C-alpha cells in the first residue's frame, strides 16, 4: 500500500492489521483448547477450526488488496 495514504485509508489499514493480530491470537487460544471426546466421536474439530481461521485470514488479505487497489486508483498524483 502506498505511503501517501491519507485519513480513512490509513485508518482502515490500521484496523485490518489489528484485526489480523486479534484473529491470530484467537486462533492460537481456541486451537490450544480443543479436547477430543472419548472414542474420537467428533468430526476433526481441529481441522475445521484451522480451515475457519484460514478463511478469515484470506478474507483479510482480500480486503487489504482491495484497499490498496482503491488507494492507488484514487491517489492524486
Image (cartoon, helix red, strand yellow):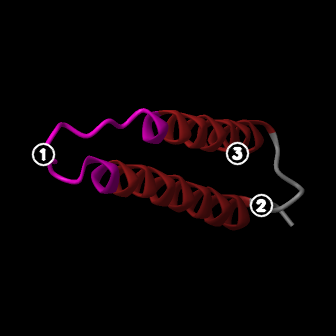
**Which residue: 82% across, 50% down?**
5
Whether residue 36 sits left or right of residue 30 in the image: it is: left
The image shows residue 48 at horizontal and vertical percentages of 28, 52
The image shows residue 28 at horizontal and vertical percentages of 55, 41
Q: Which residue is mark 1?
A: 39
Under tag 2, what secondary structure?
Answer: loop
> Which quadrant of the figure has residue 75?
bottom right
Disc 1 crowd, CA 10 A, few/some/many (<14, 14-19, 20+): few
Report how far apart the C-alphas of labels 2 and 1 lie in the structure.
59 Å
Q: Earlier in the sequence, mark 3 or mark 2?
A: 3
Q: Quadrant of the N terminus?
A: bottom right
Report how far apart the C-alphas of labels 3 and 2 lie in the structure.
16 Å
Identify the magenta region. 30-48
Q: Which residue is mark 3?
A: 13
Query: Residue 39 versus residue 73: which sits nearer the camera?
Result: 39
Query: Residue 5 versus residue 12: which sits nearer the camera?
Result: 12
Q: Which callout, 1 or 3, points to the residue nearer the camera? A: 1
Q: Which residue is mark 2?
A: 75
Q: Main secondary structure of the magenta part?
A: loop
Amino acid at each position: 500500500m502506498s505511503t501517501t495514504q491519507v485519513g480513512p485509508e490509513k485508518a482502515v489499514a490500521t484496523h485490518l492489521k489489528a484485526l489480523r493480530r486479534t484473529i491470530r491470537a484467537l486462533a492460537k487460544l481456541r486451537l490450544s483448547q480443543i479436547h477430543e471426546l472419548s472414542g474420537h466421536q467428533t468430526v476433526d474439530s481441529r481441522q475445521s477450526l484451522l480451515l475457519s481461521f484460514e478463511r478469515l485470514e484470506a478474507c483479510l488479505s482480500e480486503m487489504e488488496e482491495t484497499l490498496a487497489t482503491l488507494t492507488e486508483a484514487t491517489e492524486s498524483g
